[in-house]
Amino acid sequence: MILNKKILCFLLILICLISLSLSSANYKGTGFTHNVPDNYYDSFSTQDILSKYNNTFYISEEKSVCTKVVDGDTIYLSNGKKVRLVGVNTPEKGVTGYLASKRFLEKMCLNKEVGINVDDRKYRDKYGRTLAVVIVDGKNVNEMLLKEHLAEVMYIPPSEFSPYKWAGTSQLADVNTHTTTSATNVQSNQQEKVVSTTSSGGYIGNLNSHKFHVVDCEGVKKMSEKNKVYFKTRQEAINEGYMGCKMCNP
């Protein structure tokens, strides 16, 4: 009887392991695929690709060597960070297009020093990966993946970045509110924030991202106290190597 129970337990564990293996093997993510050949970029140099993107420029907040390319939208850095390219999604392993996207990212990043610009509104995903724009030679690799048709837009709010703009599409409706903000309103909001900063007396920097914010910025609300650095003036923050947040434009 005891032996039968052991056999039964073993069979149940075996079935569970097989089920997990099959579900993992069959995982297709969003189902996104593309038809770019796997070897399409073999004959291109990194500079050939970069030269196509002279109108995109991003400032790196930190730099590190890319030690591993997991797939078309995830890399590992020598500083220990696992980076998920924000705003984009490439085919999963086993899906058509997976290898082409991965090889493109390897050509751009692997064993090279790359920069990252971390998403101010959401630093990490649920897997603990840093959400960021990956930058090579001052240029936005996330945008390249979209324009080369190697990735689809994956906008998951909140995010400071606008991947629809990178893709060059007209799908610029605000996903959160389904409203469009006019340029006049944007300018007005920025002016109000500058006034607010002056009246509140100072700026708050983030030790983690090395960005500084006006005191009532959304980025400050989610910032842990241990990461806060206080500056009296904007110039003081800049002198300490901090960069302005793109949400509040301090």
Image: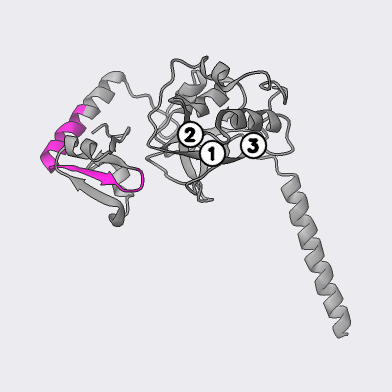
Residue toward you, 41 or 165: 41
Percent across and percent down for residue 194 are 18, 32
Residue 169 shows in this picture: no
Distance between the Cα atoms at labels 3 and 1? 26 Å
* Residue depicted at x 88% and y 85%: 1
Q: Amino acid at mark 2?
A: Val
Decide: marks 1, 2 in contact (CB < 8 A)? yes
Q: Amino acid at mark 3?
A: Thr
Residue 189 picture location, percent across and down: 24, 29
Q: Nearer the viewer, mark 3 or mark 2?
A: 2
Q: Which residue is mark 2?
A: 114
Query: Which mark lies nearer to you, 3 or 1?
Result: 1
Q: Could you tell me which residue is drawn at 37 percent across and 36 percent down?
A: 61
* Crowd around label 2: few <14 · some 14–19 · many ≥20 (10 Å): many
In this rendered view, identify the residue nearer to me: 28 or 109: 109
**Picture layout, residue 39 above or below residue 218:** above
The reply, left or right, for residue 249 in relation to residue 69 is left
Where on the picture, by quarter, is residue 233?
A: top left
Question: Left of 203 or right of it: where is 98?
Answer: right
Residue 39, horizontal then vertical, whole percent: 72, 24
Please, what is the three-letter code of the amino acid marked with disc 1? Cys
Please tell me how crowded label 1 is: few (under 14), some (14-19), or many (20+) other residues with Cα within 10 Å: many
Identify the disc placed on residue 66.
1
Mark 3 and mark 1 residues within 8 Å of each other at the beta carbon: no
Mark nearer the N terminus (3 vs 1)? 3
Q: Which mark is residue 30?
A: 3
Q: Which residues are magenta?
A: 191-209
Quadrant of the image occupied by residue 31 = top right
Extreme-bottom residue of the structure: 1
